[in-house]
Amino acid sequence: MKSIASTSDKILDIAQSLIVAGGYNGFSYADISAAIGIRKASIHHHFPTKAELVSVLVDRYRKQAEAGLQSLREQAASPADQLQFYVDYWQSCIENASQPFCVCAMLASEMQMLPEEVASRVRAHFQSLSGWLTSVLQAGVEQGLFRLNKLPEEQAQMLMASVHGAMLSARAFGEPGLFIAIVAPEIARLGVADR
Amino acid sequence: MKSIASTSDKILDIAQSLIVAGGYNGFSYADISAAIGIRKASIHHHFPTKAELVSVLVDRYRKQAEAGLQSLREQAASPADQLQFYVDYWQSCIENASQPFCVCAMLASEMQMLPEEVASRVRAHFQSLSGWLTSVLQAGVEQGLFRLNKLPEEQAQMLMASVHGAMLSARAFGEPGLFIAIVAPEIARLGVADR
DNA sequence: ATTTGCCTACCTACTAGTAGGAAGCCTAAA
DNA sequence: TTTAGGCTTCCTACTAGTAGGTAGGCAAAT
């Protein structure tokens, strides 16, 4: 139970939800200020520049994501379950609107005009996510759970694209259920023959 | 040969490229002004408000897209070719960086903070695109070219998500070739057994 | 005694949008 | 044929508000 949340954590929390909603240019220090009842200048005390704030934010997000994915690989029974938990996580995020989009996917769409320090961190997240997916697929193949007709890294890229595209469609249509409707068949297809 | 381009067309052209790069909040009237050598106020003459400008822009984009997709269905030999031409179009756009992202996909990611008049138009594009894909898949099934294990509309949603996700990945990794690497196997998979 | 966290007060640059006028063009009446 | 009106397009000059960011002070904790 983490009852206390430091001011800088609160700043990052609200900034993250604002980025998820509207991207890098879709929020301002004034927005954060209004949301957590602190003056604009005080936010600059914690994060001198916007680029720095978002860099720290992405670092934090990456650390959380990598920890979560890592513990999934250690705890979940099989590679198939690991994938299932991964998409279930996003499904519930989207369904209850808590975090209805990946912050790095959001930022990736604005890649071309992101400060370089942010862009490189977003790229790094994409790399580590595709790496995780690749290794899960690889493990699944070795255990005879998956039968891929592509290399694991290629299949991982396809899967990742599906997940991000499904997020986008769910948002575009305003239908949260669309996410799992698109992604579920995609992962089901990896199974060998199946029951 | 359309040698002359009206001022309002030039405004829409540059606005579109700016949106593709940075989204709705990623450009300003000043940016357009600087790019085409006209004063800010003159742009307001053509498009009184930003929401109106982007609405007209999306309308124009939708008309072009629907015309293009429609003529594809009339001209391309088979449903398989139609899909191929569709992804080839985007591949070349991404490869030569002319239009390296769908303007509606870009706007869809910002859906939550778009003016309603813009949001509804973006939704409409997603609907007509998924409709086109559905009917092409349907025709392919009827001609014995495709064997789907999902309903055509479900398969169309999956395909659309793949395309948008692949655009995002290509952008995130800064590797244009990633787009076709993700999308090509996805459409190849639709074919019956194959040669 | 210094650091931390927040404040007031301010800055410059930029945002979308407005007011009003000048120049050119099209049409139609004189 | 000329001229008058109206429309289009662009301009300069401006507004109120917001952007990210800074300077300096004050109080409490270390």
Image: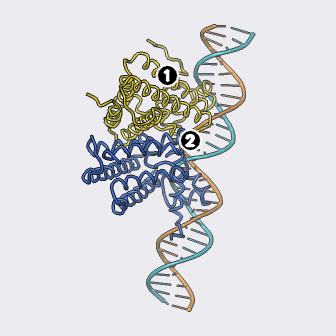
Chain colours: A yellow, B blue, C cyan, D orange
Read off the chain for label 2. B
* B160 relative to B69, above or below: above
Element type where label 1 sits in the image: helix
Element type where label 2 sits in the image: loop
Q: Residue type at mark 2?
A: Gly
Q: Residue at x 38, y 46 (%)?
A: B188
- Report the Cα–Cα distance between label 1 and label 2: 24 Å
B129 left or right of A133 in image: left
Q: Which residue is farthest front?
A: B195
* A131 relative to A71, above or below: below
Check disc 2 and report the residue beneath it: B174
Front: mark 1 or 2: 2
Count of marks placed on residues: 2
Residue nearest the viewer, comparing B162 with B1: B162
Q: Residue at x 54, y 27 (%)?
A: A57
Q: Is residue A52 visible?
A: yes
B13 left or right of B191 in image: right
Residue nearest the viewer, comparing A73 with A61: A73
Residue A64: mark = 1
Q: Are marks 1 and 2 on the same chain?
A: no
* Image quadrant in which you'd find residue A87: top left
Residue nearest the viewer, comparing A15 with A64: A64
Instruction: Give the x, y percent position of residue A105.
Output: 48, 36
* B115 relative to A8, above or below: below
Q: How many other residues sit within 10 Å of disc 1, few (<14), some (14-19) or many (≥20)?
A: few
Q: Residue type at mark 1?
A: Gln
Quarter of the N terminus of chain A within the rendering: top left
A82 left or right of A47 in image: left
Q: How many other residues sit within 10 Å of disc 2, few (<14), some (14-19) or many (≥20)?
A: some
